[in-house]
Amino acid sequence: MARLKITQTKSYIGSKQNHRDTLRSLGLKKVNDVVVKEDRPEFRGMVHTVRHLVTVEEVD
């Protein structure tokens, strides 16, 4: 199964509360934090919500 490498590239300051909560749920706290998650629809949806604050790469 493929995995997603999610990196927070922008600060959440000034963003909506639900975007902050989504970043926290993904395990991202600061700019340049990186997490690796399984490529599942749940995580894809979360990434889609905060797509302007993160970058995503597929990792095998």
Image: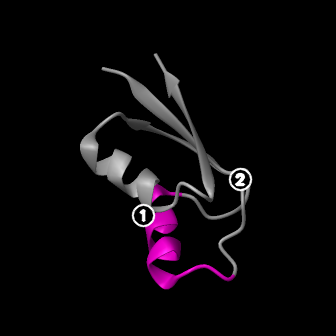
Q: Is residue 14 above or below residue 27?
A: below
Q: Is residue 43 magenta?
A: no
Residue at 35%, 48% in the rendered image: 43
Question: On the image, which quarter does residue 5 sit in?
Answer: top right
Amino acid marked by disc 1: Ser
In the image, the segment drawn in magenta is 14-27
Q: Residues within 10 Å of mark 2 (few under 14, many from 20)?
A: some
Q: Is residue 25 magenta?
A: yes
| Label 1: element kind | helix
Side (left or right) of 50 relative to 1: right
Side (left or right) of 48 relative to 1: right
Distance from Cα at disc 1 to Cα at disc 2: 16 Å
Q: At which x and y percent is residue 24? A: 49, 67
In primary-sequence order, the first of circles 1 and 2 is 2
Q: At which x and y percent is residue 38? A: 35, 34
Q: Depth-wise, is mark 1 or mark 2 nearer the camera?
A: 2
Q: Main secondary structure of the magenta part?
A: helix
Amino acid marked by disc 2: Thr
Residue at 34%, 33% in the rendered image: 39
State the quadrant of the N terminus. top left
Q: At which x and y percent is residue 47? A: 45, 52
Q: Is residue 52 above or below residue 20?
A: above
Q: Which residue is mark 1?
A: 25
Q: Which residue is mark 2?
A: 9
| Label 2: element kind | loop
- As drawn, the residue found furthest toward the left would be 41
Q: Residues within 10 Å of mark 1 (few under 14, many from 20)?
A: few
Q: Disc 1 vs disc 2: Cβ atoms closer than 8 Å?
A: no
Residue at 50%, 57% in the rendered image: 27
Q: At which x and y percent is residue 37? A: 42, 39
